[in-house]
């Protein structure tokens, strides 16, 4: 299922439970596009037959900013009772990647929001990015796929170089 942001497309593979019910989370849309996510759904059957259809209306996916700010504090303080921090520290590399990509998207959106653009806000996001990078660097490399996933996660975290701490930039 690709989700589109103003002409940019990214694909997300989905699955279903034993009852055949599809349940998934979507990434937030861009604030500059009213948090809209445009969806095209591809359905494959067991014989590799495929059908696709576009949802006629975009889906609006907004971030929960109060939860985002609380999670940023948990990450900075390495709060071990936080569900998000536990998931970041786990060896489940797919879960870590999913959470990191979603959370980084929210932080990048905050960077473009005048309500979250003070020097203090920027420094806090830099600390969070450093904490996430440390978590990623502690993941055990098991094969080339894990190397690619770890390197792509680090690339996503460091893409906004204004929000990289000095100690992280030295590494």
Image (cartoon, rainbow, N blue to C red):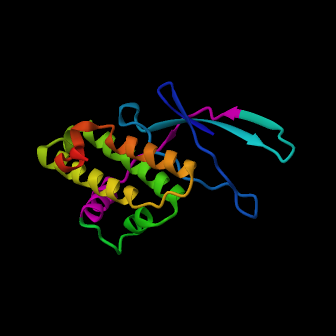
152 inside magenta stretch: no
Which residue sits at x=63%, y=56%?
23
Which residue sits at x=21%, y=45%?
170
**Left-right relation of 52 to 99:** right
Q: Nearer the viewer, residue 169 or 36?
A: 169
- Give the residue at the far right of this rendering: 47
Q: Nearer the viewer, residue 146 or 9?
A: 146
Figure quadrant of the N terminus: top right
In the image, residue 3 above or below residue 74: above
Q: Nearer the viewer, residue 157 or 73?
A: 157
Where residue 73 appears, as percent x and y from the top left, is: 25, 62
62 inside magenta stretch: yes
Per the rendered image, the range of residues in magenta is 53-76
Which residue sits at x=39%, y=56%?
136
- Give the residue at the far left of this rendering: 119
In the image, residue 37 above or below residue 18: above
**Left-right relation of 78 to 93:** left
Name the quadrant containing residue 115: top left
Where residue 5 appears, as percent x and y from the top left, is: 47, 31
Look at the image and tell me whether residue 11 can be seen. Answer: yes
- Give the residue at the far top of this rendering: 7
């Amino acid at each position: 299922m690709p989700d589109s942001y103003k002409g940019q497309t990214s694909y997300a593979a989905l699955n279903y439970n034993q009852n055949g019910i599809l349940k998934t989370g979507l990434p937030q849309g861009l604030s500059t596009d009213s948090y809209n996510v445009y969806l095209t759904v591809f359905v494959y059957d067991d014989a590799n037959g495929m059908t696709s259809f576009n949802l006629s209306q975009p889906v609006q996916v907004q971030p929960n900013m109060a939860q985002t700010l609380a999670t940023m504090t948990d990450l900075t303080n390495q709060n071990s009772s936080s569900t998000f921090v536990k998931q970041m520290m786990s060896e489940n590399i797919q879960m870590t990647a999913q959470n990191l990509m979603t959370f980084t998207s929210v932080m990048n959106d905050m960077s473009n929001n005048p309500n979250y653009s003070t020097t203090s806000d920027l420094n806090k996001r830099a600390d969070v990015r450093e904490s996430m990078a440390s978590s990623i660097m502690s993941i055990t490399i098991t094969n080339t796929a894990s190397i690619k996933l770890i390197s792509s996660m680090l690339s996503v975290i460091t893409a906004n170089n204004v929000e990289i701490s000095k100690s992280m930039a030295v590494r």
